């Protein structure tokens, strides 16, 4: 809820109610139980500081790829390298489960776009007016991929 309130482009618009957040996390848990999703969370004590998900393609022609999605870091933990650490661990997990291609997307001009560039992801396209922000403005989304070694 903090990530959404602070403007993170992770698919929700503020205000994100507890019921809506709970329903989303129940969907994530169901996908994990079906072997389609991996959730990585960074904690400090009992507090979740950030998280990222790996969505595993299950169709035969794409079982070598996965999507990095829903990367967020709580405002209290930003600017400490946590997003990059989560991405690094996500890549290691993807490799361990046999994935050699990662894709991800993010809002153009945001911090995640800069991070993808810095991490060596390849930009393969942009779609204007792809996602809406809280104020109703439509934003361009940038798409990236990375071949894992």
Image (cartoon, helix red, strand yellow):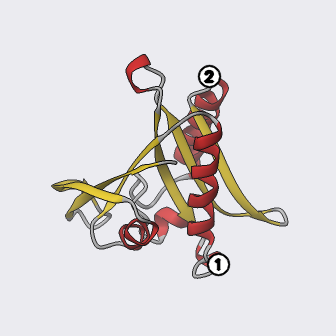
- 71 w.r.t. 49: above or below: above
Which residue: 62% across, 28% down?
A: 30
Q: Which residue is mark 2?
A: 34
Which residue: 42% across, 61% down?
A: 14
Nearer mark to the viewer, of 2 and 1? 2
Image-based side of 62 in relation to 108, left or right: right
Image-based side of 12 in relation to 56, left or right: left
Image-based side of 101 in relation to 20, left or right: left
Label 1 neighbourhood size at 10 Å, few (<14), some (14-19), many (20+)? few
| SS label for mark 2 | loop
| Residue 56 locus on image (x, y percent) | 51, 33
Marks 2 and 1 sit apart, C-alpha to C-alpha, by 33 Å
Report the front residue among 147 and 111: 147
Furthest-top residue in this view: 60
Furthest-left residue in this view: 128
Which residue: 32% across, 58% down?
A: 122
Query: Quarter of the image containing the N terminus?
Result: bottom right
For residue 81, which quarter of the picture? bottom right
Report the front residue among 23 and 52: 52
Which residue: 66% across, 50% down?
A: 40
Q: Which residue is mark 1?
A: 76
| Residue 112 locus on image (x, y percent) | 42, 67
């Amino acid at each position: 809820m903090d990530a959404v309130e602070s403007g993170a482009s992770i698919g929700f618009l503020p205000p994100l109610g507890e019921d809506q957040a709970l329903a989303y996390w129940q969907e994530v848990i169901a996908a994990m139980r079906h072997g389609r999703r991996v959730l990585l969370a960074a904690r400090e004590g009992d507090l979740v500081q950030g998280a990222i998900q790996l969505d595993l393609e299950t169709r035969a022609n794409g079982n070598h790829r996965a999507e990095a999605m829903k990367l967020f870091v709580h405002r209290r933990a930003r600017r400490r390298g946590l997003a990059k650490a989560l991405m690094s661990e996500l890549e290691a997990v993807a490799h361990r489960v046999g994935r050699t291609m990662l894709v991800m997307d993010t809002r153009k001009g945001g911090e995640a776009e800069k991070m993808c560039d810095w991490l060596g992801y390849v930009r393969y396209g942009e779609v204007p007016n792809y996602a809406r922000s809280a104020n109703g403005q439509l934003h361009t989304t940038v798409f990236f991929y990375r071949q894992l070694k």
